[in-house]
């Protein structure tokens, strides 16, 4: 994948910056902690996922995010509004992730202490908009999420990053192209190939999961058994 920001491209229209962004930036530059917190919380999920699509590690993606935020807030006074605040932050995260990956490749044995994140909260790729209250269904969803995460991790980087931007973060073709320094046609081609590779990966690995589809075990099985016995033998 070509290095992000290495390709010249026209800036977005200044109207891409909302009045809310302008106000948040102004307050954050003035060290308003509530504004800084609001910016971080509004962008955390997207930036984490983008970082992880490059470094492919949960803990390292969090490190990238922290460093990128420090760089961003140190330079926030220089934010010109040529793109949205979210896009500006995403470019900083991409550059930080690429630099981190480059350093990792240059060092044969990287010294990364993952024990610093023993209780880190990992943002997963959800299958639905809410957490299931059914333990069996929740476990099945987690297994599918883990399978999907592994399949995405195995994609070549140029496809993986486009997939994360377009499908997981629902960015438009134009936003993705502008962010990654690509032509819109290239974004479409890479997304198509990414989806095709994911379908192939699932065809190879999802077969064993069919035995766990529509689980009817544990409390559900016990409840049904008790209900049948009660109807067969109401006097018991």
Image: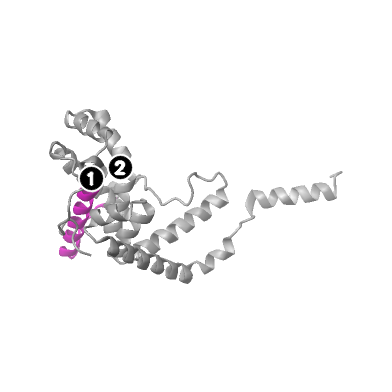
Task: Give residue 89's mark.
Answer: 1
Query: Which residue is disc 2 drawn over?
Result: 43
Q: Is residue 143 above or below residue 30?
A: below
Residues in magenta, as a range: 88-114
> Label 1 crowding class (10 Å Cα cut-off): few <14, some 14-19, many 20+?
many
Image quadrant occupied by the N terminus: bottom left
Residue located at (52% from left, 50% from top): 138
> Label 2 crowding class (10 Å Cα cut-off): few <14, some 14-19, many 20+?
some
What is the spatial separation of the Cα atoms under label 2 and label 1, in whole angstroms? 8 Å
Of residues 164 and 67, the one drawn nearer to the viewer in this rendering: 164
Residue located at (27% from left, 29% from top): 34
Residue located at (45% from left, 56% from top): 145
Of residues 228 and 9, the one drawn nearer to the viewer in this rendering: 9
Q: Can residue 137 be found in the magenta stretch?
A: no
Element carrying mark 1:
helix
Disc 2 to disc 1: CB gap under 8 Å: yes
């Amino acid at each position: 994948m070509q290095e992000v920001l290495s390709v010249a491209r026209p800036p977005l229209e200044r109207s891409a910056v909302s009045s809310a962004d302008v106000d948040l930036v102004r307050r954050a530059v003035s060290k308003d902690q509530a504004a800084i917190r609001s910016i971080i919380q509004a962008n955390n999920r997207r930036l984490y996922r983008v970082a992880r699509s490059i470094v492919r590690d949960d803990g390292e993606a969090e490190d990238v995010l922290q460093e990128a935020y420090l760089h961003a807030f140190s330079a926030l006074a220089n934010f010109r509004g040529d793109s949205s605040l979210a896009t500006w932050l995403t470019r900083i995260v991409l550059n930080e992730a690429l630099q981190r990956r480059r350093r990792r490749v240059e060092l044969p044995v990287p010294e990364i202490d993952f024990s610093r994140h023993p209780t880190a909260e990992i943002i997963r790729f959800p299958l639905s908009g809410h957490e299931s209250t059914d333990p069996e269904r929740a476990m099945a969803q987690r297994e599918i999420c883990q399978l999907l995460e592994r399949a995405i991790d195995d994609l070549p980087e140029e496809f993986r990053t486009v997939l994360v931007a377009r499908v997981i973060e629902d960015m438009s073709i134009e936003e993705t192209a502008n962010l990654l320094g690509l032509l819109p046609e290239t974004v479409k081609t890479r997304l198509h190939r990414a989806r095709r590779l994911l379908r192939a990966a699932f065809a190879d690995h999802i077969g064993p999961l069919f035995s766990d589809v529509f689980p009817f075990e544990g409390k559900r099985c016990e409840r049904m058994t008790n209900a049948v016995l009660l109807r067969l033998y109401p006097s018991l």
